[in-house]
Amino acid sequence: MIQDLYEESKADQGGELNPTEDTSTFRLDLKLGVPHSKLQGALEWWTGDSGLCLKPDHHPYLVAAEISAGSWCSQEDIMQAISRGVMEAGPVQVLVNSVFDPEQPENVSLYQIYPSPGLRSFLYRIAQICPVHLKPGSLIDSISRGVPAPFILVPPLNALDPILKTCRRIEGTKPKREIYKDTNPSHKVHNQKMMEYDPVPIEILRMVLRRDTRPVAEYDLFQNIWLTPLESILRKNAISSLREFRIRKGFQMNKPHFEREKDIYIISDLHLGHTNSIPRYNRPFMRSNPDEMDRVLIRNWNWTVKKRDTVIFLGDLAYRSSIPSDSYLDRLNGRICYLEGNHDPYQPYMSHCLLMCYKGVSYLFIHDPDEVSKPFDGWVIHGHVHNKNLSKYPFFNPHTQTVNVSAEMIGYRPITMTEIHNLVTEVKETISFREIPREKDSNQNLSDERVRYIHTRDYHACQV
């Protein structure tokens, strides 16, 4: 359909470009932004940084489309088409699948790229307005042919084993304890099948417009503004972009949301003060500003949990922080039942695990699911694994009867026991990530791409 639109547009304009017109070729690139989970190969190294402060050629990108200028459209027309197309389309993401070829060089990673429905819709809208070239290897060409786009990356380290480290036990770490073990043979077969890694979604936060290969502007999808090449690498714009991304996705609350009925709240692995948790678990924050991560996570907690609510916290509150864990605890609402994590210095108030019968269903709460090594027929609520292996440990897995409540899996805010129990009793399919209510998009119906936002400590407002 995109190819048909291109041919129709060319015919309407009388065939070829007028040689006296501007014959510049524009190219639209997609900067790879925030992955939902751990990636395989070289991209795992590169996407430790969202690339918002890097020049376009210093971060992995995908070629979305090539567009002709001249009598068909100007640079301004292309920029307006892009900004309006983003606002009218759905979420712009790509699905990345690793391809392992035994004949490929060891320092090369191969991938297949699948565009999301929102990205397909966006490119279709661009093709309706602008004359696009179906350049081999571009996303728009792959969509027109119905095949995934290839992507090759050469990293500054071995692509087959990008994070290989010598395994050793760190002095002072606690040995694993045997608790319960799943002896169901059907679960064992399913686990063996799930050892293969699933494709990983990557959020697109910026698009780069090039004129004859030279970057001329970057479009910020979540601030809905165009940035000059100089503005695009400024730290303040990167911070604003990530903040808008978190708000739109529901990862950062901009007002309190308390449940009317009394409930039990669960969350794990905040890793407050842990700078390296940002690239390691692909958290949408600036690595240079872990204090902002702490503020958002603590505020999300306190705007979800009331002072008299019960919270089951499954460990790893803080790590490598200059602030003591007890100081963080004093800032958190609720009556906290603290389960010991592998990064927590032991305190007398900590337990290792918790058994609960909730509305007739047995639940085991524990930090590390691999410590469940004795027969247990109920559901295991755990943390520890974060978003590193969605195949084995997604948010909700009815086949193995596990629920992963690591902060990244549940939207960086506590989840109620009622919500978990409703999933256990009603849902039979695997859910990779918790679906959380998103804040209302204040500029959903605005067509002017010059929208600006005002931010304060306690609220988020829109101003045109």
Image (cartoon, helix red, strand yellow):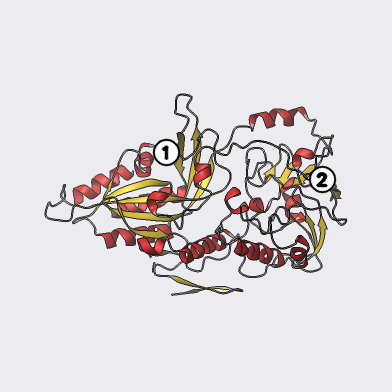
Mark 2: secondary structure = strand
Residue 150 % position (x, y): 41, 36
Identity of the residue drawn at 45% across and 71% down? 452
The circle on residue 151 is 1
Residue 426, visible in the rendered structure: no
- Foreground mark, 1 or 2? 1
Q: Quadrant of the C terminus?
A: bottom left
Q: Quadrant of the N terminus?
A: top left
Residue 387 % position (x, y): 63, 46
Q: Amino acid under label 1? A: Phe
The circle on residue 364 is 2
- Closer to the camera in the image, 129 or 316: 316
Q: Amino acid under label 2? A: Leu
Q: Is residue 189 left or right of residue 151?
A: right
- Closer to the camera in the image, 24 or 176: 176
Identity of the residue drawn at 29% across and 43% down? 4
Q: Residue furthest right?
A: 348
